[in-house]
Image (cartoon, rainbow, N blue to C red):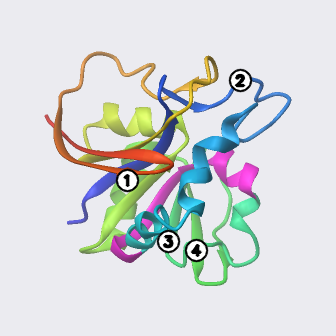
């Protein structure tokens, strides 16, 4: 069965977006800095590995809509499962197939794991989808890319968890734009 892993960038003070999402949808005011680390040569191998080991993606309807489905080719070249309350038929963009799952995070993670086979399921967020994945008990690993910035406000990654969740530290790596932490989620 596929390993289910969340993968997200956040500020040193725990935000995955900046404030003012109503004025700057997507990453909020100052939030673009959270994704600059992978544009550098030192960060590129993290994304290359992500795509090499992943067989499916889980994301939110909001992220899907903000990105416009990642352009004409869909970016990922693998199945993407979009958690939503609004039913929609499957969308195909290049080699990427978007399936809209209305039965909640457990159904989306299960379908993604089946599609991924022996590869990983990449839960990319936003924050609510990662929170739901942690609460579901199905998320097995968490990769955090901590960017050296204090946003002071925005969307917190670890709000609404419903109690403590134990993590086991697996790895730490530093690049000029971020510190990369990998944890196993303990149950």
> Does the image show residue 85?
no
Q: Quadrant of the N terminus?
A: bottom left
Residue beneath label 2, please? 19
Residue at numbered disc 3: 79
Q: Nearer the viewer, mark 2 or mark 1?
A: 2
Q: Residue at x 72, y 41 (%)?
A: 26
Mark 2 falls on what kind of element?
loop
Report which residue position mark 1 lands on.
Answer: 109
Q: Which residues are magenta?
A: 52-67
49 or 38, which is in the foreground? 38
Q: Is residue 135 above or below residue 161?
A: below
Above or below, 168 against 99 in this view is above
**In which quarter of the view is residue 96 placed?**
bottom right
Element on which disc 1 rests = helix
- For the residues labelled 4 and 2, the Cα–Cα distance comes to 32 Å
- Quick one: 130 or 32, which is closer to the camera? 32
Q: CA distance from mark 3 to mark 2?
A: 31 Å
Do labels 4 and 2 touch, CB within 8 Å? no
| Secondary-structure class at tag 4 | strand
Where residue 117 sits in the image (x, y, percent)?
Answer: 28, 74
Label located before the other in sequence (4 or 3): 3
Q: Secondary structure at mark 3?
A: strand
**Would you call the spot at circle 1 few (<14 residues within 10 Å), some (14-19), or many (20 or more)?**
many
Residue 12 magenta: no
Q: Is residue 60 among what the camera can see?
A: yes
> Of callouts 4 and 1, which one flags the residue occurring earlier in the amino acid sequence?
4
Q: Residue furthest front?
A: 176
Q: Position of residue 176 (x, y in %)?
A: 47, 50
Give the Cα separation between the discs numbered 2 and 1: 29 Å
* The C terminus sits in image quarter: top left
Residue 97 badge:
4
């Amino acid at each position: 069965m596929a390993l289910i892993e969340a993968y997200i960038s956040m500020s040193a003070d725990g935000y995955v977006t900046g404030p003012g999402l109503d004025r700057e949808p997507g990453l909020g005011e100052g939030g673009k800095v959270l994704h600059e680390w992978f544009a550098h040569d030192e960060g590129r191998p993290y994304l290359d590995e992500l795509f090499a080991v992943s067989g499916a993606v889980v994301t939110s309807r909001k992220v899907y809509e903000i990105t416009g489905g990642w352009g004409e080719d869909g970016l990922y070249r693998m199945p993407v499962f979009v958690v939503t309350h609004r039913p929609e038929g499957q969308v195909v963009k290049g080699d990427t197939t978007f399936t809209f799952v209305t039965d909640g995070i457990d159904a989306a993670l299960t379908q993604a794991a089946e599609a991924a086979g022996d590869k990983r399921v990449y839960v990319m967020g936003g924050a609510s989808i990662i929170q739901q994945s942690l609460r579901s008990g199905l998320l097995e690993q968490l990769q955090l890319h901590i960017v050296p910035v204090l946003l002071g406000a925005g969307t917190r990654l670890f709000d609404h968890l419903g109690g403590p969740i134990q993590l086991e530290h697996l790895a730490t790596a530093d690049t000029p734009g971020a510190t990369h932490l990998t944890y196993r989620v303990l149950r």
